[in-house]
Amino acid sequence: MVLLLRLVVPRPRRRARAVVSRTFDRDRIAIGRRRSFAAVCAAVVLVCADDRAEAASCPRPEALGVSRTLPIEIGANGLFVGTKSYPTTLPLQDHEIVLTFDDGPAGRTTDAVLAALAAECVKATFFVVGDMAAAHPDQLRRMAAAGHTIGHHSMTHTIMTTASFEKGRADVVRGWETVDRILTGATGERPTTPFFRYPGFAATKPLDAFLVDRRVGVFGADFWGSDWNKSTPEALLALTMSRIEARGRGILLLHDTHDHTAAMTPKLLAALKAGGWRIVHLTPASGPR
Ligand SMILES: [Zn+2]
C-alpha cells in the first residue's frame, strides 16, 4: 500500500522532515533523518497529501498560509524540544515559526483566535486542557475540523512538580482520554496526537519516563509573548515580535484564553507576513494510532 502510494505520488520538492529522537537522560540527542524505508514513504505520502489539502483549502493566494508541514515521529527515546526547557528544538529553518496556543478551548477568545488563523489559512497546534475541552466539546471539534493539531496539556492544568507521580500521571492520561473521547469516541494507550506540553513547563523525571514509554512527545517553546501578564494587544505584539526576531526561528507559545492575545493574533499574522516569516504546521507522522 505504501509502496503503491509512493509510486503514484509525484516526487515532492525536497523538504526537511523531522524524525527527532532523544535519549531519556537528556545528555545525548540525536536528530536523524531516516529511520526506515517504510517510515519515509509514509511520511512522504503524508506531506504530499497535506500540502495538496492546504493549497486547495485556501482561496486567498495573498494569505500567510502554511509554508510546510513537519510530520513529527516520536521514537523509542521520546522527544523533548523547545530551548526554554531543553537543549534542542525542532529542525526549523531561518524565519520558520511554529504557532502554539495553550489552555483552551476557552469559548469567545478561542473563537477569535480560530477566526484570525482561518483568515490567513494558518494552522497551529493547540495544547488543550481536558476540563476546557469537556466544557467546550463542539469548539474542540471545530478546532480539529479546521485542520489544527490538537496536543495535550493535562486534565486540570496541574503543575506536576506539586503532585505525586500517580496523581500527575492520572491527570495527564485523563486529559488526553477526554480529548480523544470527544474527537474520536475512543481512547487508547497513546493519545491520537501524541504531543504533550507540561503546564507551566513543570516537568518531572518519572512523568518524562512515562511519556517516553507511551511515545508521547514533550513540547516546550523557544519564545513566548508572556501573555499571562496583563497587556495591550499592541504591547503584546511588540514584545512577541521582538523575541521572534531575536531568535530567528522556533516554537512560539501563546494562550488562546486571553482577550489581549485574541486581539493580537490578526496583527501578529500580519506582522509575520510583512516580515517574510513562514509558518510550519506540526503533525504526528504516524497518524492516528
Ligand atoms: Zn498552560
Image (spheres, rainbow, N blue to C red):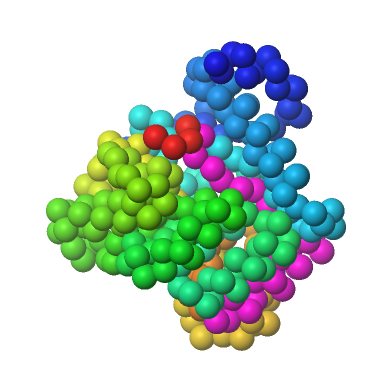
- Exactly how many numbered labels are in the figure? 0
Which residue is situated farthest in the right direction here? 62
Could you tell me which residue is drawn at 70 percent across and 22 percent down? 9
Left or right: residue 286 versus residue 146 is left
Rendered position, 207 above or below 175: above
Task: Tell me residue 200's x, y (percent).
Answer: 37, 65
Could you tell me which residue is drawn at 59 percent across and 55 percent down? 146
Left or right: residue 68 versus residue 70 is right
Rendered position, 232 above or below 53: below
Q: Is residue 191 visible?
A: yes
Rendered position, 189 above or below 137: above
Q: Is residue 200 visible?
A: no
Task: Tell me residue 27's x, y (percent).
Answer: 37, 38
Could you tell me which residue is drawn at 24 percent across and 58 percent down? 171
Task: Tell me residue 1's x, y (percent).
Answer: 55, 16
Viewer-proximal residue, 69 or 176? 176
Residue 283 painted magenta: yes
Left or right: residue 6 versus residue 108 is right
Q: Specify the quadrant of the image occupied by residue 21.
A: top left
Rendered position, 89 above or below 118: above
**Magenta region: which residues?**
259-285
Could you tell me which residue is drawn at 41 percent across and 64 percent down? 137
Residue 63 painted magenta: no
Q: In which quarter of the image is the C terminus?
A: top left
Viewer-proximal residue, 270 or 235? 270
Task: Tell me residue 30's x, y (percent).
Answer: 47, 31
Q: Specify the quadrant of the image occupied by residue 2.
A: top right
Q: Specify the quadrant of the image occupied by residue 16.
A: top right
